[in-house]
Amino acid sequence: MERPALRRLVRDIADTDDEEISCDECFDLVSEYVDLEIAGAVGDRVLPRFQQHLRQCGVCREEYEILCDLARLEAEGNLPRLPA
Amino acid sequence: MKARTNAEWLIALKSDGHAQATALSDLRVYLLRAALYALYRRRGTLRDFAPTDIKQLAEDCAQDALSAILKHLDQFRGDSRFTTWAYKFAVNAALVAARRERWGRVPLDRLLDSPDLVERFGSFRDASSDPQRGALQREILEALRQAIETCLTKRQRQALTAVVFEEVPLDELARYWGSNRNALYKVLHDARRKLKAHLSERGFDAKEVLDVLGNDG
């Protein structure tokens, strides 16, 4: 068996909660979380169930990471321009 | 392009005439930019795409995102910038499209059929040089193998194999099964809960399992 995959499975099992939010609920929260993170305010209002979902769900995590980079670039005024 | 507050976006998009047309046109530009950014970040999965193909795909994603935004406009609560809220629809559309491009040609039926997760567990050998730790690894692995064999449904085993071991994206497996992301996440969540409960019944707590199998060594 592939050891990294086994490690992933074990970590996912250990990190399992009885109640977890769905991908739709994660999508609902992600923009709020990203803006809190950019404002450095995530410590003031942690969303633990959102963070737990991101650890468990690769597709939601991928979308969160790109949204985060995009929102940060926009906040810095560095969003890439559209190609002609 | 005019910078707008959240309230200005909402008023303009819900109005009619020139103000709405301008807001829609501006929003489309924002969404196109977001979709292009997301697609270029996943350029590796779009190797066969020329820049013009990527731009076309981004335009389709931006259009899909715009339709979704207009449908969900009343759900915007103002707890983020409007543009961040809007971008998530474009990022989602772009990444779903990129994943479909990457996985659409992979025969998931073959991947799901073999080998089963129980067989995969049979092939695992502990790697610890410490005999005591090695024995504990074997014990936990056997408990896990049993739990997978006796507690999980075939669908749960297939979902775990595909998503955790083969790294098939959730939405692509859901699409293949004619399901959706939420439902498949629940299949996996139920499977993980059963495995965790079984290990706990056998006297292994999550922290111990993680310590023995979740880290290197």
Image (cartoon, rainbow, N blue to C red):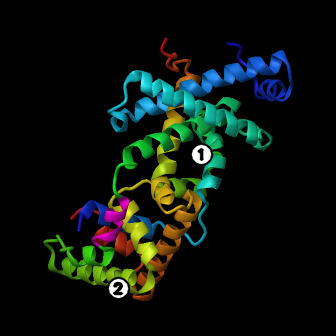
A61 over B87 or under it: above or below: below
Visible residue check, residue B21: yes
Q: Label 2 sits on what residue type? A: Gln
**What residue is disc 1 on?**
A43
Of all chains, the one bearing label 1 is A
The furthest residue to the left = B129
Q: Given the image, on which type of amino acid does mark 1 rest?
A: Gly
Q: What is the chief secondary structure element of the magenta stretch?
A: helix
Please name the residue shown 80% across and 22% down the image: B20
Quarter holding the N terminus of chain B is: top right
Q: State whether residue B129 is above or below residue B142.
A: above
- Residue B102 percent location from the top left of the image: 37, 44
Q: Comparing marks 2 and 1, which lies closer to the viewer?
A: 2
Quarter occupied by the C terminus of chain B: bottom left
* Residue designated by label 2: B146
Dot 2: element: helix
Q: Is residue B109 magenta?
A: yes
Magenta-highlighted residues: B108-115
